[in-house]
Image (tube, rainbow, N blue to C red):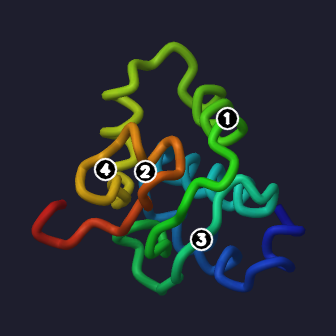
Amino acid sequence: LERAELMNPHFQWQRQASQRVKPQRRCILVLLQLEAIRGNIEPLEFSEDLTALGWGGFVVRNAPAFRQAVKDLFPGHAKKTVNNSFRRAGLSAEGGQWDHAWRGLVRFVKKKCTEM
């Protein structure tokens, strides 16, 4: 993950700040950072706000590779469980269109405080 910090200065802050969040959220954070490095997702804006692990959102660019990485992180879990895990981490499919978000047709975005 040192390479991640070199590629994006926000990644180091996110990893340090994420020590205060639940392990599952930290795993999602590391997944997002690695998938951004691999080019499978494209981050939107970043912030120093842990509501969405410091991410303002992202767009899936390589859907098959990203979905496989998510399946590897959540082996055997139902799609609804995975969606809820991302939602609890502060990221939601734009317009609630989860299937479209996983295919890169709509963005994953930071949830508003009223949605959390």
- Identity of the amino acid at label 3? Pro
Residue designated by label 3: 43
Q: Earlier in the sequence, mark 1 or mark 4?
A: 1
Residue designated by label 4: 88
Q: Quadrant of the C terminus?
A: bottom left
Q: Residue reaching furthest left?
A: 114
Q: Earlier in the sequence, mark 1 or mark 3?
A: 3
How crowded pointer 1 is (Cα within 10 Å; few <14, some 14-19, many 20+) is rated as some
Q: Quadrant of residue 1?
A: bottom right
115, above or below 79, in the image: below
CA–CA distance in space, label 1 to label 3: 17 Å
8, above or below 52, in the image: below
- Identity of the amino acid at label 1? Pro
Residue designated by label 1: 64
Q: Earlier in the sequence, mark 4 or mark 3?
A: 3
CA–CA distance in space, label 4 to label 2: 10 Å
